[in-house]
Image (cartoon, rainbow, N blue to C red):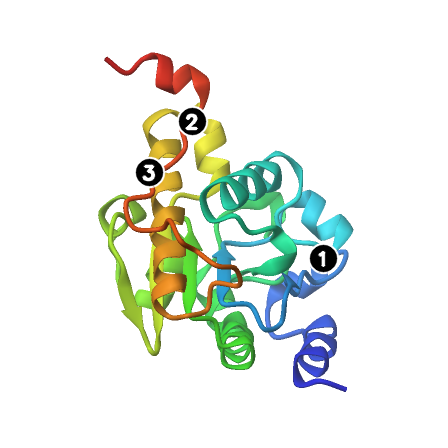
Amino acid sequence: MSELVALEREVATCTRCRLAAGRTQTVFGAGDPHAGLMLVGEAPGAEEDRLGVPFVGRSGQLLDRVLFEETGLQRSEVWVGNVLRCRPPGNRNPLDDEIASCRPYLDAQLDLIRPAVIVTLGNFAAQLLLATKDGVTRLRGQQHRWRDCVLVPTFHPAYILRNGGGDALVAMRADFVRAKQAMVAAERYPYPAAVVVGHQPSQPAHSAARQP
C-alpha cells in the first residue's frame, strides 16, 4: 500500500473536528500522485460531499476548462484537493479550528506528492499556506515561494461564476499561465513546452470583442 493510499484511508475515518458528524464522506483529493502541479481549494460542497470528488459541477467545469486552455493539462495530470476534507454545513466558510484540524493532512499530501507548483483557489488556501491575512486580490498576480515550491494564488472558480467572469476570469487565466511557466522552469511540465514565455491568456469571444 502506498503512503498516499494509507493517508486516504486515515482521512476516511477522521473525527478530528465537528465536520465529521455531518459529512456523507470525506473528499481526499484526486489526480496524479506524482503531479508537478497541485490545486488547493477551500472545502467540499454538497456535490463533492455526495460524490467524494473535489470540484464537481459548474465550478469544476470552469476549473477544468481554464486548466486545459492555459496549461494544456487535464485534471488527471494534476492533483486537485482542498484545505478541508469535509463539507461545512450550508457551505459556510471553514472555521479556524477546522482548518487547524485538517492542516496535517494537507501538509502530508504536499510532502508525498511533492509538486513544483501550487495554485491556491480563493482566500483560505492562500492565507493558510502563506501565513497571511491578505486576500487573494492582493496576493495574486505574482509567484510566491512556499518551501521548495512556487505558489500562485488565484480566484476560486465559484467566485468567478458568481461575478459573471469578466476581469476576474481574465486574471485567473493569467495566473494559470504563470503556473505553467513555473512548471516549465522547474522542469516538471510533462510535455515539450516550446512556447511558454510570452504566452498570453486565452479570452472568451465576448471578452475579446470588447477590446479596442
Give the vertical position of 173 relative to 98 (above or below).
above
Q: Nearer the viewer, mark 3 or mark 1?
A: 3
Disc 1 element: loop
Residue 131 visible within the image: no
Amino acid under disc 3: Gln
Give percent across and percent down for residue 149.
36, 72
Mark 3 or 1 closer to N-term? 1
Cα separation, mark 3 vs mark 1, equals 41 Å
Disc 3 element: loop
Which residue lies at the image location 70% right of the left edge and 74% below the top edge?
8
Q: Nearer the viewer, mark 2 or mark 3?
A: 3
- Residue under label 2: 165
In the foreground, 169 or 205? 205
Mark 2 or 3 closer to N-term? 2
The circle on residue 23 is 1
In the foreground, 176 or 84? 176
Q: Quadrant of the N terminus?
A: bottom right
Which residue lies at the image location 70% right of the left edge and 54% below the top edge?
53
Q: Bin the neighbour count of mark 2 within 10 Å (Cα to Cα): few under 14, some 14-19, many 20 and up.
A: some
Which residue lies at the image location 58% right of the left edge and 43% below the top edge?
64
Mark 1 or 2 closer to N-term? 1
Amino acid under disc 1: Arg
In the foreground, 174 or 19? 174
Locate residue 9 relative to residue 149 in the image: left or right: right
Cα separation, mark 1 vs mark 2, equals 31 Å
Give percent across and percent down for residue 88.
59, 53
Give the vertical position of 12 relative to 84 (above or below).
below
Give percent across and percent down for residue 180.
40, 55
- Residue under label 3: 200
Give the vertical position of 167 relative to 200 (above or below).
above
Give percent across and percent down for residue 156.
45, 44
Q: Bin the neighbour count of mark 3 within 10 Å (Cα to Cα): few under 14, some 14-19, many 20 and up.
A: few
